[in-house]
Image: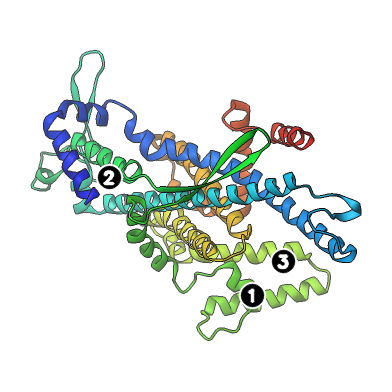
Amino acid sequence: LPHLLYIMAALLAKRMIPSVVTYLATRTYLNAILSFWHPLYLTILAISRLSNHLKSYEQVDTAEGETELPSKLSGRNPEKAGRRGRLVTPSMLKKQQKQKTEMKALRSEVEDLLKYWVVYALLLALFRALLLLPIFGRILNVTAMTTSVIDSTAQPAKIGRWSTGRKAGLLDKFRLSGRFAEELRLAFFVWLRLMPVPSFSGSEVSEGKRSEKIVEVEPNKHRPLDISYDFLSPITISAMNSSAFLTKTESFSGSNNDNKTYFAIGITKFRSILDLAVMLRLCSKNAQDWIISTVVESSSLVPAAVTLVMPSYFTSYGVIYVSLIVPAGYSSRSCAAITRQKTSAELDSLPLDDSRRYLQFWVVHAMISVFLDFISPLLSWVPFSTHMTWLLWAYVQLEHPTRKLHSFLEKELALLGLVSSKDNQNASETLEDSA
């Protein structure tokens, strides 16, 4: 019912105030802000908070492990006993409980961000794939009307592979106008991001004279984001469940599964060879783990690797698969791990650290996409530029390059003041501990 009411409200707004709707959709940056820049900003902030909470949560686990054994040996209350006689005060216990509650709330925020980027990536991949097709490309290749600010004259801008200078044909009659496409995009992203508000439940933690309310988010499963994610995520999961796809846990566990693929069997034998190399001191254990991790992550790229030896038109489909489908599949699996963690009693930081990696990827993906769009006129003149773009996305989606590139971007954002630097965070944590 709320979704039907929204559709009726959108149609009524288009009927009553069409000029305002057209102005917001075509003359402002509202579409770009709602669909790209604001989610990107929220992702950057979530990564910063998640890194701090993961660090503090590890410190809490360490402190709890240190107080467990001395309390058993001394027979004292674990709230008052600590390693080397260190006392654990009630305020410290309240702080630990506060950190755990904040971690749960942040976990829901990370899950929502992953869901949004999965939906965004799949819709973008679908649109780009259809745009490459001759028939659908002619229909979806909208005629954007660019209006000059000085003389207010509208000029049609032809965009896309299948745009030609010939007269309009039969398919051109079904082509969407740029104005209608932008209005439809605005209505969709307002529905996706702004329609229902999730239900909240909170717990209050008081520290002295201060009282701070910690809100734990429990999202409503009828939100547009959840509906879109539940509809689109099985597509990427089925695409990722190819004969070449593996996960880290499956490769490192070494379990004897009758349904193992040939690629998984090859990875197992290759790991045995690396075990022998480690035993003979030919390589280190860290090098072995890095090689196995890289091979496993690259396994999802095998279905698109054949496009590297094809012309650029077919390689464009491989670029879509590598840059959008594969990261969306990994993000869906990470989101599913967070969902399974909600049902468990213990709060494990490993799925959150894995989710942080994919959030970092979407930040890096956004920056690289903006850069590639900026130099796209130049790339159109470079031979094999599509193939080089394929290799770039194949490299970026690996874990080590993702974290390295995000670390570089994080330093640049800290210089611009968009995120707080690590030194300031450590200093503020030291002041809070001393207080």
Distance (Cα) linking label 3 and label 1: 15 Å
Tell me whether the residue at label 3 lies in contact with that at label 1, contact meaning CB atoms closer than 8 angstroms. Answer: no
Counting residues from the N terminus, which is met first, the one under dot 2 or under dot 3?
Answer: 2
Q: Outermost residue, bottom direction?
A: 258
277 left or right, relative to 247: right
Crowding around mark 3 (Cα neighbors within 10 Å: few <14, some 14 to 19, many 20+) is some
Tell me whether the residue at label 1 lies in contact with that at label 2, contact meaning CB atoms closer than 8 angstroms. Answer: no
Label 3: which secondary element: helix
The answer, for residue 69, to whether it is visible in the render is: yes
Q: Outermost residue, top direction?
A: 150
Q: Pinpoint residue 313: horizontal percent, then vertical percent.
A: 34, 53
Q: Nearer the viewer, mark 2 or mark 3?
A: 3
Instruction: Work out whether residue 363 or residue 419 is closer to the camera in this orientation and state it.
Output: 419
Crowding around mark 1 (Cα neighbors within 10 Å: few <14, some 14 to 19, many 20+) is few
Distance (Cα) linking label 1 and label 2: 46 Å
315 left or right, relative to 244: left
Distance (Cα) linking label 2 and label 3: 44 Å
Per the rendering, the mark at residue 161 is: 2
Given the image, on which type of amino acid does mark 1 rest? Ser
Per the rendering, the mark at residue 253 is: 1
Given the image, on which type of amino acid does mark 3 rest? Gln
The answer, for residue 176, to whether it is visible in the render is: no
